[in-house]
Amino acid sequence: MMPMDIDDTQSNKPRTENPVGDTVSEVQCWKRPSGVAVICLGLLCGLLLAGIIGLFVYSRDQQARYSILGNEKDQFQSEEDHLQTHFSTLSKDRDLLHTKCKTLKDELQTNYDNLTKERDQLQKSYDKLNEERDQLQTSYNTLTKRRDQLQTSYNTLAKEKDELQTSYNTLAKEKDHLQTSYNTVTDERDQLQTIYNSLTKIKNQLQTSYNNLTKERDLLQTSYNNLINQKCPKNWKKFGCSCYYISSVKNTWNAGRQDCLNRRADLVIINSREEQAFIKALGHRSWIGLTDRDVDGTWRWVDGTPMTTSYWINGEPNGGKKENCGENKISNDDPVMAWNDQPCDHENYFICERFG
């Protein structure tokens, strides 16, 4: 644009008289076309500059693109190497999987053959279990008839018999159940047999004891009858199976007992309310065969047996260690309550007792 302005300025200047004349005109005529050329040249320079700039920009873009392409090429090359490595690994894995598949196929074939053999064995076992089931069912039915309480269980198992035909596992479970029931019933039968044997022994022992007691009863009855019918010695009084002697003189407890022993008797031992009423009705304050000399407060009869039934007067015994021998008083209005404790060296009448 600048050359174009210069040319315009120059073209607007006043023409100068040139002594040369026509030569100057020729020069001016020659300059006019050169301005256009300058303009064209300027335009060409501008276009060239624009082209250079464009080429520069294009070259820079191409350089950047080339750099990017180079990076992408390197990346693609790396990925290609990675893919090649992965492909090699996959090839090895494929070969390994092929080998494993072949091995697995052989194992599966072997397992299939083994399972076939096991199936045949299981079929035999199944048939055998069927036979055992039938045998156990028969045994179970026989035992069920012997026990009324298992009738309900038998009916339930009879209904389950048809259901157990469906599968081997169910059959095995039923077999175990029946085996358990059979064992339980067998154990119960053995226990019942043991109890029966024990009861039989006890029955025999009781029978023997009964027979012995019957004989003893008969002997005692005979002895009792003999005692009842037997008469007491002179001056002795009879009550029940015993004979009683009432002393005519007083003496100490020890001396009275010795007198009874000399008469093949002992101081009286009172075993019943009737006997106590009989002793009191004799009408004598007398020694009886009761003492706590060995252990104070523990009264025993002269035969060593403990006192279990007593007829003490209200408030007695109360003498402690000073009064260790028992007497029968008559001053009490009660028909039986008449016992009192006294010092053993006190003198009383005494009553002897012996079997007739």
Image: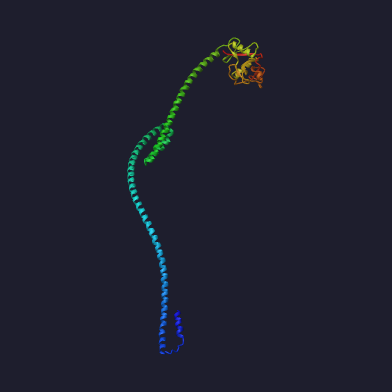
The quarter of the image holding the N terminus is: bottom left
Q: Residue at x 55, y 13 (%)?
A: 227
Question: Image quarter for residue 276?
Answer: top right
Above-or-below relation of 247 to 45: above
Residue 163 visible? The answer is no
Residue 148 position, x and y percent, is 43, 33
The foreground one among 255 and 351 is 255
Classify residue 267 as left or right of residue 101: right
Q: Is residue 258 visible?
A: yes
What is the quadrant of residue 3 in the picture? bottom left
Q: Is residue 72 left or right of residue 303?
A: left
Q: Nearer the viewer, residue 77 or 274?
A: 77
For the C terminus, the image quarter is: top right
Residue 276 left/right relative to 45: right
Residue at image position (40%, 32%) is 143
Residue 13 picture location, percent across and down: 46, 86
User: Which residue extends farthest front?
Assistant: 19
Viewed as shown, does residue 64 lie left or right of 249? Answer: left
